[in-house]
């Protein structure tokens, strides 16, 4: 038989053509979705936030404290592109300080810290701006108070450091002196635990704590070292300018710092248990000092 071959018709041929057509459409959709996804990732990589070795803080209260007390040191400030609770007020504060907010996705924020912890805002600094002892003395003078500073000897746990600074801010301490080596410095974790108090109380970093204590004594300070073998803190007068020394979580205060102390003080405890966390001990001693000086 000659002539043109008959074209397949009927349900079977129609179903075959439909299947081929549907499969083609599905492949096209997959290609388009992949293309869009790649483009999205490419755009995201292009604008990806790079904090490098910068110092940064996060959370509404902490960023607000940074804006109030240290706005001039802030390089960039990021906010969630999805508006969070109370975010508008902090944005307005940032703008009033001459900063231009930048907006990023929550998944970008989550690359650095938990999205919930960030609460939709991050402030970035080149580095933390440490102060000096004169700033602490100036703060005491402004308040019309006798200076009270803490000297922290090799506190290693950032959370202990943050908790001490937070309590110090509440107690009205005028400055915190920390060691440069073998101790926790000011980090994002310290900032978070302190609830931003690192910005409103002078934090001073020194290379030699013993030398710093000598300098304080020359300025008229009395140096009190927290030591288990000292006299009860409740029997001390704590008059005049006071420097309170607190030691390492496990080793206590170094011999060099103890030698520079005028008095050793302790917190009375029951006989069968004699261990307090350093941040708790710091709180008790700070408030005993300010109570004796009728601050409250």
Image (spheres, rainbow, N blue to C red):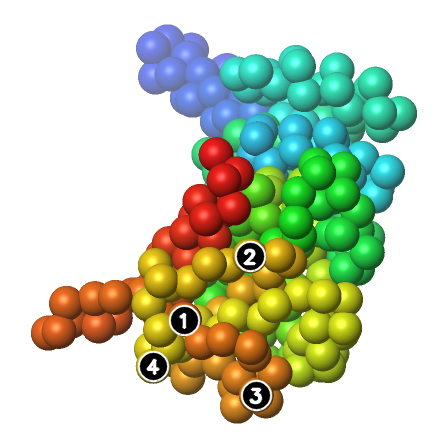
Q: Does residue 204 sit above or below 40 in this rendering?
A: below
Regarding mark 2 in the picture, which secondary structure is present there? loop
Q: Are marks 3 and 1 in contact (CB under 8 Å)?
A: no
The quadrant in which residue 236 appears is: bottom left
Q: Are marks 4 and 2 in contact (CB under 8 Å)?
A: no
Say whether disc 3 or disc 2 marks the residue closer to the N-terminus.
2
Say whether disc 4 or disc 2 marks the residue closer to the N-terminus.
4
Q: Residue at x 62, y 57 (%)?
A: 240
Say whether disc 1 or disc 2 marks the residue closer to the N-terminus.
2
Q: Residue 172: x and y, percent? A: 57, 42
Give the residue pinned by disc 1.
265
10 Å neighbourhood of mark 3: few (<14), some, or many (≥20)?
few
Give the residue pinned by disc 2.
239
Measured in 3D between alpha carbons, the distance from the residue under mark 4 to the one under mark 2, in whole angstroms, is: 21 Å
Regarding mark 4 in the picture, which secondary structure is present there? strand
Q: Residue 140: x and y, percent? A: 71, 45
Q: Which mark is residue 229?
A: 4
Give the residue pinned by disc 3.
259
Give the residue furthest to the right. Answer: 98
Q: Does residue 285 sit above or below 196 in this rendering?
A: below
Q: Does residue 64 sit above or below 202 in this rendering?
A: above
């Amino acid at each position: 038989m000659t002539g043109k071959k008959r074209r397949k018709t009927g349900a079977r041929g129609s179903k075959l053509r439909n299947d081929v057509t549907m499969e083609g459409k599905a492949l096209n959709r997959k290609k388009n979705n992949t293309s869009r996804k790649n483009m999205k990732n490419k755009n995201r990589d292009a604008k990806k936030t790079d904090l490098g070795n910068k110092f940064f803080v996060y959370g509404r209260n902490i960023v607000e404290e940074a804006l109030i007390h240290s706005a001039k040191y802030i390089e960039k400030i990021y906010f969630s592109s999805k508006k969070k609770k109370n975010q508008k007020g902090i944005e307005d504060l940032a703008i009033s300080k001459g900063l231009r907010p930048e907006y990023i996705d929550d998944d970008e924020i989550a690359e650095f810290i938990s999205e919930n912890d960030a609460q939709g805002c991050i402030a970035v600094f080149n580095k933390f701006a440490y102060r000096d002892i004169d700033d602490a003395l100036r703060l005491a003078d402004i308040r019309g108070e006798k200076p009270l500073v803490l000297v922290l000897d090799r506190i290693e746990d950032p959370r202990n450091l943050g908790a001490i600074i937070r309590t110090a801010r509440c107690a009205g301490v005028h400055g915190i002196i920390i060691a440069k080596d073998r101790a926790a410095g000011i980090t994002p974790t310290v900032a978070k635990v302190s609830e931003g108090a690192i910005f409103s109380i002078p934090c001073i970093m020194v290379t030699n704590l013993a030398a710093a204590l000598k300098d304080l004594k020359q300025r008229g300070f009395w140096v009190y070292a927290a030591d288990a073998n000292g006299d009860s803190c409740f029997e001390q007068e704590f008059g005049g300018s006071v420097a309170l020394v607190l030691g390492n979580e496990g080793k206590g205060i170094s011999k060099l710092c103890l030698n520079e102390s005028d008095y050793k003080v302790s917190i009375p405890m029951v006989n069968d248990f004699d261990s307090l966390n350093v941040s708790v001990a710091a709180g008790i001693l700070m408030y005993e000092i300010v109570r004796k000086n009728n601050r409250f």
